[in-house]
Amino acid sequence: MPAHFLGLTGAATLGTRHFHLTGRIIDDLVAHKAVGVVHGPAGTGKTFAVDFHLERLRERDAKIAACSLAFPSEPTMLRVAAELVRALTGSAPPNSRSRFQLINTLIGLLAGPRRLVVVDEAQRLNGACIEMIRHLHDHPQTSFALLYVGGDGCWEVLSREPMLKSRVFRRLPFQPVPSEQIPQLIRGYHPIYAEAHDALLLDVDDSYAHGTLRDWAVFTHTAADLCREAGRTTLDKEAVSNAYMLLGGGA
Amino acid sequence: MSLPIPGVWDPDGYLLPRRPRIIVVLDEHDGPHAAAHLRRIGGIDAGRVVVRPTPAVASLPAFALDVLAALEKNPVALQRKTRTGWRHARAWLAAARPTDLVIDRAHLLPYALLLAAAHAAAENDATLWLIWAGATDPHPAIAALKAAGHETDTRHISELPHDLPAVPRHQPRAAPKPTAARPMLPAADFPLFLAHARRRLTDDAFKRLATRYGTATFHTQQWLTSTPAQAGLVPGGALDPVALIRWLREQQIGPQRSGYEALITLRATQAVLARVGILLAWDRSGLGPLPENRLPSILTSPLVRALGTLPRTEDALATALALHLEQDGGCFVCWNLADVETSTLTLHPPAEHRHVQPKTERIATLPSQERTDAAARLEIPCRHPVTLPTDTDRILRAHLARRRMDGAGPGDPLFPALGRLSPATTVAQAIRRGTRHVGCDPWWLDRERVRARRPGPRLITSSWMTERALSLEPIPHPKQAR
Amino acid sequence: MSPARKHGRGESERSARRSPADRGMVAERMFASPISRFQLAGLLGVHIDDLADANLARLPVHVLIDLAGQTDLHPADLVPDLEPLLALRRLPRADAEQPDPNTRHDAHVILAALTVTRGPLSPGALAEALDWTLERLHAALDLIAAEPDLPAPLTLHRTPRGGYFLAARADLINQEQRERLNTTADLDAFDFPPRFITLLAAAIAHGRTERYAAFKTEHLLAHNELTGLHLLLPVPGEPDQVDVHPDVIYSLTGYQTEDRIAQPPHLALAEHLRY
């Protein structure tokens, strides 16, 4: 199971609708060797959901090899190719490799066992990178499923490329959790919320988290520590107030 | 850039002007259907070559690699872009004889590469399909092609399945029914082989053997009674051993697919030849535990296919010849283009020879009382016709096309010298590359091993016959009783 | 000389680290094997003086298998690089079967038979002596090769003076088989030289006529050898006439006949040889 944000302990995995749909999408992509996109604002739980279901995939079927890659900045096509080689083989390709050799090495690697390739932060890819990945996916000798995961503006960037938009088989936009769903959802997230008042939870969401699960994780990490130090098992106003101060003042 | 309209070589060697049919297939949505359909239209065997250019390809040498990959060359062997890469690509394309040359993602290619593709299609009288995806305006490219003298048609992607139909998926050959393992064959020499087989095999096994034995007997008798010229009979009734060796290699024993088949064929052949006074002797003692497995040719169909994945035509052809004849290529330098008969895959003896003469080249004719000299078993391949197996035709055509593209004429060598290297060294290096590519390591290519096995001045040290420990000897005519 | 050059192209570090004593032991075992040094050099593709230092890692697999089998050496002794690979587990075999119990019995019969023969026998000679098909014989030989610890069918006997010796179990091979094991000519490895073919053809055509005497005189060595192999059979009362073994007639002409009366095939053979 993927770790919660900052190693938060005691937290449960929130079974939101999007969380479950991510699992369904991954299964569908693998079954059909298709292309999918999971996107949405930062902190809405995309990466956690994808990581969770990748782990589940690995445990369920050892024959499916899944690999993930991400890029810290706008990569070149060759950089993407080299990182993909590294993700598939565990080592970087020789520097002397030409583009032709690199691409054909990837074709050879992706022709093997069933695979799922996950490209995170996909909004950083330019048209050349997307075309290169398309070339690999469309090649008659390759056989792999492809999942793009990205944050703000990801779908806008990807959908500008007709060759990608026309090939997307599954797409799941993540959104912040609507406020009306917060109390019921968050109560199951951590023990300190089990007995907390709805109003308190809504206040935290309204002032700090705004439906973003990562922000709830940050808040929970802080609030749980405060409750533990104060010998409390349930979140209360004082804990909330103190947490706000530690987190930069709230709303 | 503009290129002259290329021509097509007619059988007499004249260049005929051709204009290719160019079809620009518009796919404005850039959907997955084009790629899916291109997977279904078959490959070289169906007369279609589908090029999927590496993204961002910009130069002709780089594009050549993509074309070679489309022609089933192993990308691992395509190490780097070379000046001559495009010529190799054109040569292999000519050998493939495509009816359709498809360039996927053509909208991403520079005009120079589109023109090169048009040129290559024209050379082969093939239709050029340019899959034009996305919103990029094709008209500038069409105008560039027109400026170079090419006319184009346009189609919509929805019409592609009709215009370039899918071919039925090739059904893999059904796996052979599991049968009992092939019986061991008697080890007895031919004067006892059939009798031992009859006694020591099960009835079914002997029936199968007898059928094959009978076929081989028939073929041998047929060859012996064929026209004197074919049988190599010379005045006086002597049999030309070279013709016999050639027949054994290219028709009777070489093409057998297994040691089992080859051994039965050999025994039948020996029995018939004995009746005309020829002993085809087989010294099995040095051939290992299953000597019959050494009888068939090592140039098998899978090996020919593997050679076909080499990008350099000279490597593929020289290696095919070397493995067919089981000799290094010392004599290959003699052949000129005019000596090649493409229709029969035969290389005929040249008018003049350029090979280094071995010390002994005497080949006795049979039958005679004189024992054939050991060196007489060593073929000089350029001295008589050599016919390659039928599945090497593409390799031969590719190399001939390549030589013509180099500007070679009928009187020019089949294997020219490369740079400052001598022709013989060029051929030797080509064979070394080729054998390494297919994982073959014949001892006769390695000088150290040659010296170890055949000390002394370096002659032609191996041949198809010697590698099988086969030899021809006359059976002495017994003196009549007085 | 650099280590790479000294140890030859392609030799790995593991092989290169073998001590001279190790190399010596392997060489010793190779030289003690039944094949001659010349045959060994031919098998390895080296000069006879270079046998001890031959780079075995370059050998084709089938030669390595043959060499290991001939010398009873573990493959990793020949090529140390194989050591870690031979420890890998094999895939489970889908068609793994237990050998036929009859084959196991046949294996014991062969072991017993080989203890009573005077020397090595080819599979063909064994099959002739035991009157088995080659398939049956090789199934049993394969089992023996696969189970080198198969118990040998021997019984312990005492001499009158108290000494011990081993002998094959008497119940496994009958008297007829025992006689054939020691008298059947082993023709599997016999390659007929041209002069033998000549004499056989002459015998087929003229063996029962007065003309054969001249052939016999001219090719006496061949005649004696073929007679010793029981391929030329004496005619009772006619010292200068012979019959040719039906196996030879059949194998050379495809005709089966026990009757020596001249038949067209015999004359046809003579015609073909242009007598």
Image (spheres, rainbow, N blue to C red):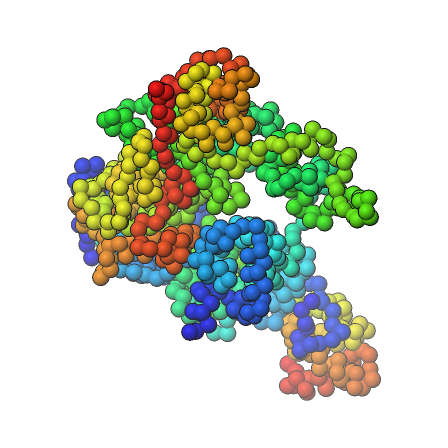
Residue shown at the point (64%, 34%) measured from the top left: C182
User: Which is more toward the observer, A154 or B103?
Assistant: B103
- The part of the image, by quadrant, that contains residue C194 is top left
Q: Is residue B394 left or right of residue A176?
A: left
| Number of numbered markers | 0
Quadrant of the image containing the N terminus of chain B: bottom left
Where residue A60 sits: x, y (%)?
68, 56
Where residue C107 sits: x, y (%)?
70, 39
Quadrant of the image containing the C terminus of chain B: top left
- The part of the image, by quadrant, that contains residue A247 is bottom right
Residue shown at the point (57%, 35%) measured from the top left: C186
Q: Is residue A34 left or right of residue C94?
A: left
Q: Is residue C57 above or below residue B306?
A: below
Where residue C153 sits: x, y (%)?
75, 42
Q: Can residue B149 be seen here?
A: no
Where residue C55 sits: x, y (%)?
49, 61
Q: Can residue B389 be seen here?
A: yes
- The part of the image, by quadrant, that contains residue A50 is bottom right
Residue shown at the point (71%, 84%) measured from the top left: A243
Residue shown at the point (23%, 26%) measured from the top left: B235
User: Which is more toward the observer, C133 or C93?
Assistant: C133
Q: Is residue B252 above or below residue B481?
A: below
Q: Is residue B377 above or below residue B420?
A: above
